[in-house]
Image (tube, rainbow, N blue to C red):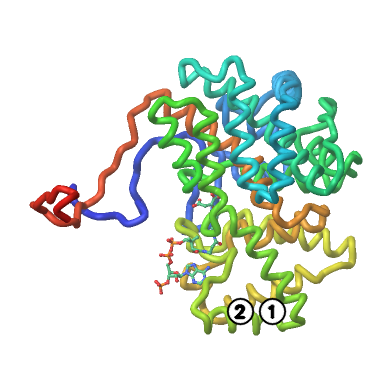
């Protein structure tokens, strides 16, 4: 039993957690017991951060003070902005630029070390506040514009859209974006959270854990899929191909459909349902139903084909990009936006794990040769 191999650690329990629960059989997600649907519709991202980091929903006074403390940390050092400029000039991809800049942030945090458990939340608040500033600056400088300074009077979601565009967002855009942040904030021991936890389990500082989490999230099997989905929708549009034909061609090539399938969900991801509904509302009010039509056609076809019944159903990445597109957000910023939200979950899990820390160190079944005879280099 001890030697049973679990490829990809599928189903392996490595920790206890009060933070979030994913019921993959019925398609339910809760953060500390609260259904994601209630949180997405009723709570702001700041409330969700408070819930994840401090264990309960804040009252109005607690939220005001928490949100003000977070907003006060939004500025980033000029050296970081200069590095962001250099990365943009070099044509760096946004997730890679975010990974580099996040790592650099620790140089300007006088409190970047310390007892991991306590320090994790203090450092984590600064990282969470500064990531949107880094991302918006990166996007602006690569468009030939100057970065926009953060506005501490705006919400986390509203301030990001403001720094991105230079204009305060309307209420619908701010609410939509805030909802997307809430939906992406935490999700059990997904690959990027586990990466952050492995790093945190060595008692390294949380800058290291978040930097690692960003790297893990960037891959196309994880957060990177939201960009892939949108690229597919653009490809369909540019080729004037029927979306169903695109799927058939992809299947004939033996390729996977981005935005479908999940390690835990065997039914449609509840976040995908909420985002689809939001996309429907946005499409109805704008009259532009193109992405909705394509995504719906793909989902219907794969459902008819029995793929969804086999457990390969739409995940959160299938609908998020179309929602971001309606907010005018560039396609390669979708995964960084995922990171901007998920950082809250990474920090919460690292802090929780460090309360009763044990170094994470699994092992591999050795399949290499035994008793190899060593030959000195000049005799090989
Ligand atoms: C926020 C997130 O991270 S959500 C996930 C985002 N990623 C994607 O959308 C990328 C596309 N999806 C995938 O690659 C996978 O579903 C994953 C990586 C998310 C989960 O994969 P795993 O749990 O490891 O499942 P695994 O890769 O073993 O696939 C199981 C079977 O389903 C098939 N399958 C899984 N996903 C897909 C897909 N998107 N399209 C077609 N077939 C798929 C596999 O080919 C495999 O079939 P087989 O048993 O006949 O070989
Ligand atoms: O849980 C996972 O494996 C992937 C996922 O949906 C997420 O991280 O949001």
Label 1: state its secondary structure.
helix
Toward the front, the furthest residue is 378
Q: Residue at x 72, y 45 (%)?
A: 88
Asked whether disc 1 touches disc 2, contact meaning CB atoms under 8 Å apart, the reply is: yes
Q: Residue at x 39, y 30 (%)?
A: 201
Label 2: state its secondary structure.
helix
Q: How many numbered discs?
A: 2
Alpha carbon distance from label 1 to label 2: 6 Å
Residue 124's tag is: none
Where is residue 60, by image quadrant? Answer: top right
> Percent position (x, y) of residue 182?
67, 42
**Residue on which the image places disc 1:** 243
Pick the front one: 5 or 214: 214
Q: Is residue 216 above or below residue 241?
A: above
Crowding at dot 2, Cα within 10 Å, few <14 / some 14-19 / many 20+, comes out as many
> Percent position (x, y) of residue 165?
86, 44
Q: Would residue 363 be found to the left or right of residue 266 on screen?
A: left
**Residue on which the image places disc 2:** 247
Q: Is residue 214 above or below residue 127?
A: below
């Amino acid at each position: 039993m001890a030697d049973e191999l679990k490829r990809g650690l599928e189903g392996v329990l490595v920790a206890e957690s009060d933070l979030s629960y994913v019921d993959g059989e019925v398609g339910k997600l809760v953060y500390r017991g609260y259904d994601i649907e209630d949180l997405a519709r009723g709570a702001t991202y700041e409330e969700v951060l408070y819930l994840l980091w401090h264990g309960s929903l804040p009252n109005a006074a607690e939220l005001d003070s928490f949100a003000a403390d977070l907003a006060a940390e939004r500025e980033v050092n000029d050296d970081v902005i200069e590095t962001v400029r250099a990365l943009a000039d070099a044509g760096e991809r946004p997730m890679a630029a975010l990974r580099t800049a996040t790592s650099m942030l620790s140089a300007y945090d006088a409190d970047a070390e310390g007892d991991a458990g306590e320090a994790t939340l203090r450092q984590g608040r600064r990282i969470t506040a500064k990531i949107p500033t880094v991302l918006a600056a990166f996007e602006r400088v690569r468009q030939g514009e100057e970065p926009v300074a953060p506005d501490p009077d705006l919400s986390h979601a509203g301030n990001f859209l403001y720094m991105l565009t230079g204009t305060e967002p309307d209420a619908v855009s701010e609410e939509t974006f805030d909802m997307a942040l809430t939906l992406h904030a935490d999700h059990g021991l997904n690959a990027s959270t586990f990466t952050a936890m492995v790093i945190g389990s060595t008692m390294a500082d949380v800058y290291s854990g978040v930097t690692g989490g960003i790297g893990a999230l960037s891959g196309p099997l994880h957060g990177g899929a939201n960009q892939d989905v949108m690229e597919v929708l653009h490809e369909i549009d540019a080729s004037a191909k029927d979306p169903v034909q695109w799927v058939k061609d992809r299947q004939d090539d033996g390729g996977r459909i981005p935005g479908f399938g999940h390690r835990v969900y065997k039914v449609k991801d509840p976040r995908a349902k909420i985002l689809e509904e939001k996309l429907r509302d946005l499409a109805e009010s704008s009259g532009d139903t193109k992405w909705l039509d394509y995504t719906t056609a793909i989902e219907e076809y794969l459902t008819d084909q029995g793929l969804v019944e086999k457990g390969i159903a739409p995940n959160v990445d299938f609908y998020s990009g179309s929602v971001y597109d309606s907010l005018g957000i560039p396609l390669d910023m979708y995964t960084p936006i995922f990171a901007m939200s998920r950082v809250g979950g990474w920090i919460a899990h690292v802090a929780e794990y460090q309360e009763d820390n044990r170094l994470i160190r699994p092992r591999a079944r050795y399949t290499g040769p035994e008793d190899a005879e060593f030959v000195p280099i000049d005799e090989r």
